[in-house]
Amino acid sequence: QVQLVESGGGSVQAGGSLRLSCAASESTFWRYYMGWFRQGPGKEREGVAALSTGGGVTAYADSVKGRFTISRDNNKNTLYLQMNSLKPEDTAMYYCAAGQYFELSRPGRVDYWGQGTQVTVSS
C-alpha cells in the first residue's frame, strides 16, 4: 500500500506559478508510473501529466503543454508538478497518482491516490 501526500497548493493570480509536491511512503516509489490529475468544481477528474518510472517518458494534457512540467526524484520518493503561466481554468483539486501504468484518459487504472491539494487561480 503506497501512501501519497501532496503539498504546495494555494491561491495565485493568473500568470503566476506554483510547484506541487507528492511524497510517497515507500522506497519502492521508483517502480511506479506516476502522474497528476485534477478535478474542478462540477467537473470530472482529468489527467494532467504522467511520468514513467525512470522519468524518461512524459505525457501531458493538451491544456497544460508548455506550461506545466512533471518530474520525479526517486532518491527522495517525491513527484513534482511545476505549474507556470497559471490560468483561472487551472483551478481545481490536484491529485497525485501512482500505478503500474495508466493513461491520462483512464484514471480508473490508477492504483493509489493522494488526498489532493487545492489550487485556485484568480483573474
Image (cartoon, helix red, strand yellow):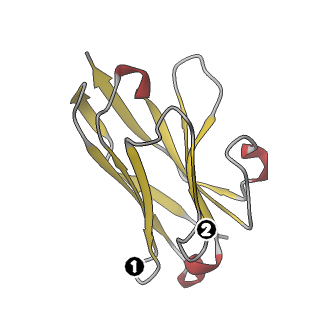
118 left or right of 60 in image: left
Instruction: Relative to 100, say whether 69 is above or below.
Output: above
Q: Which residue is mark 1?
A: 76
Q: Which residue: 25% across, 31% down?
A: 11
**Mark 2 Cα-neighbour bin, 10 Å: few <14, some 14–19, many ≥20:** many
Are circles 1 and 2 on residues that touch, CB within 8 Å? no
Q: Quadrant of the N terminus?
A: bottom right
Alpha-carbon neighbours of circle 1 within 10 Å: few (<14), some, or many (≥20)? few
Can you say whether 39 is above or below 3 in the image?
Answer: above
The answer to which quarter of the image holds residue 100 is: bottom right
Report how far apart the C-alphas of labels 1 and 2 lie in the structure.
16 Å
Residue at the image point whose x is 25% and y is 15% from the top: 123
Q: Single out the mark in the foreground, 1 or 2.
A: 2
Q: Which residue is mark 2?
A: 52
Q: Position of residue 82 (x, y in %)?
A: 34, 51
Q: Could you tell me which secondary element the residue under label 2 belongs to?
A: loop
Give x and y (percent) for residue 112.
Answer: 66, 58
| Depth order, front residue of 12/3 | 12
Per the rendering, the mark at residue 106 is: none
Amino acid type at mark 1: Lys
Label tally = 2
